[in-house]
Structure formats: C-alpha cells, structure tokens
Amino acid sequence: MPATLRPALLKPVIVLLAAAIFAIDAFTPLDSAIAVMYVVVVLATVLAWPRHVLAVTGICLVLTVAAHLCSTWFGIVNSSLARCAVSLAAIGISGYLAHAGARATARLLEREESLRHSRAQLAHATRVTTLGELAASIAHEVNQPLAAISANGEAALRWLRRDPPDPDEVRHALERMLADTERASEVISRIRALARRGEPQVAPVDLGGVARDCAALLQRELASHGTALALDIAAGLPPVRGDRVQLQQVLINLLMNGMQAMAPHGGQLRLTVAPAGAGVRIAVTDQGPGIPTHEVGRLFEPFYSTKEDGMGMGLPICRSIVESHGGRIAALPGGSGATLEITLPAGGTGSPA
C-alpha cells in the first residue's frame, strides 16, 4: 500500500482486501498459498492501525485456518495442509516484525519530540541569559524614548504657559510624545519577544528588519566595547519563512561573538544581508584574531569554545535553529578576522523547532 494513502481511506481498503483474500482462498480452486497475501494486510495495518498490528495478525491467522477448513469441507479443492502452514508462518512472522517496527517507530517519535522540547528550552534559556548580558543596552534603548517624552511634555507646558498660549506648538509636542511612546512600546515588545517561552511562530520574516532590530538592541553594548557596526543590507530582499525571534537570537549571538573576539581594543564589525541565489545570505565579519584552520570544524560542537569563559553552547544552538529553517551556517577560514555565514532559503523549507 502506498505510504501516502490517508489512514481514513486505508482502513476500508484493508478490510476489503482481507475479505477478498479469504473468499479467493476458501472458495476458488487455486492450488497456491493465496493466504500469504495477508502479509500485505498486516503491513498496511502499520499505517492505518499501528497499535492493533497483533490483533489484525491474529484475525488473518483465523481467516487462514477458516479458509482451509472451508475449502476442505466443501471439497472445492484438495488444499494441502502444507499450504495452510506456509501461510500461517508467513502471516505470523510478518505480523511480529510489523508490530516490532511500529513500536520502534513510536519510541523514536517520542524521543524526537523530547529532543525538540529540550532544544526549545535550551534556546529559551540562552535568550534569557543574553538579555541579562544586554541589560545596560536595553535600559539605554528604553530610556531614550522616555527622555524624549519628558522633554516634549515640558515643551508643551511651556507653550501653554505663554501669553497667549500657542496651541499649534503644543499639538506638535504632543504628536512627538505619541511617536516616542510608540517607539518605547516597540522596544518593550522586542524584548518581551526575546524573553517569551512558547512554540515557534512561523511566518514570513524580513531579515533586513531583523538585522536592524538587532543593531538597535546592541547599539550601546557595541559602543561600550569600542566596536563600530557597519550594516550592509540589500534592498528588495525576499522574505524567509520562519520564527522571527529565533532568527533574531542567531544574529545577536553572532554579533556578540564578533564583538567579544575584538575585545579589548574593539574594531569594526560588519553585518551583511544580501540575496544569494534562491535565498538570503547573512555574514558577520569581525577584525579579531581569526579562527585557526584546525578549529573551524569544531566551532559548532557542543561545549567547545575558543573563549576561556565560554560555555560552548551559543553556536551549536545557532546551527540547530538555522538548520530547522532549512538553512546552513558555516565559518569561513582564511584572512584576518573571522566570518560566519548563514544561508537561508527564500520562503523557507524547514519547520523551526
């Protein structure tokens, strides 16, 4: 039976097939082990009723014996006991193997689900840790619109105290306050999105917008480390289908790694987002000491880090996220500094974990 056939359609097909095999075996003069065809019924049951493989196997065994008795009783064909024995053995063996395969598949699916849940928890813990490291930058980004709101409020009061008051200037000040309020709300929303814990939200994502959000969030952190961030974002980028928060987590991690690689003297960090064939390419390039050729292949191993105080989990989590989006991440050796490159398919082919 084709694996793509829906279980709802497969169930009546299995019943009809079993009935047809029984009728042919019991009431036709075929001198062959037609009951061996029950093996097809047993194998199809793995797709339709995976928990009832042994029960269906037992039914097929009973039908085989019944057909043998019917053919002998009615004398339509001198069926041999050997034919019945061969059929029973084939059905029993296939039923046992199918049952064992179905149980192994179920256990594998359970483990995969448990692994996916563990990866999601680890990614969330890493995001929360990153937010803790960016506390000063977050406070600075929130304080900027709040300070602007306060300044515009004082300006509005001054225009109201004038004799006569200037309502137009008051209106302009209030409009600026509303704009700054919305900006502060957007900052809080981005931070809450990074801190949230839940299932991935798959949707079309503008990677250019994700890059700009990351640059804004890291602005103060980069400045405190003497790092200048150069953004090179191409226009007209195709959208990538995936989880915006997860992709933002990947970019923040790569930018933080590049910034720390250039410590304590700082330097220029370049973030490039550009079309690449049928997808989008993201590259983060620093001016640090670079990556030794013999370490390139180990960068994405769990618990391996080139930093003395590194946990070695950031890049493995990034790789897991990128691959779940159908993409690829790699370190490019050679030259001064280091470049980490991500390619993601336009539209997305993966299913974020």
Image (cartoon, grey):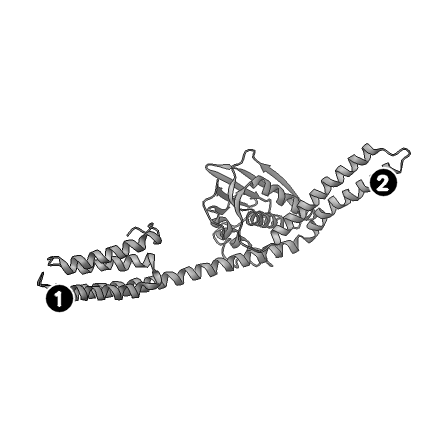
Q: Secondary structure at mark 1?
A: helix
Q: What's under tag 2, amino acid-wise?
A: Leu
Q: Is residue 178 above or below residue 297?
A: above
Q: Is residue 160 above or below residue 218?
A: above
Q: Secondary structure at mark 2?
A: helix
* Residue at the farthest front position: 74
Q: Residue at x 33, y 63 (%)?
A: 52
Query: How many other residues sit within 10 Å of disc 2, few (<14), some (14-19) or many (≥20)?
Result: few
Q: Which residue is mark 1?
A: 82
Task: Give the total number of marks visible in the rendering.
Answer: 2
Q: Residue 17 location in percent, x, y?
A: 24, 55
| Circle nearer the N terminus (1, 2) | 1
**Quadrant housing residue 27:** bottom left
**Is residue 33 something one can see in this rendering?**
no
Q: What's under tag 1, amino acid-wise?
A: Ala
Q: Residue 350 location in percent, x, y?
A: 46, 47
Q: Residue 300 location in percent, x, y?
A: 50, 53
Q: Which residue is mark 2?
A: 157
Q: Is residue 33 left or right of residue 269?
A: left
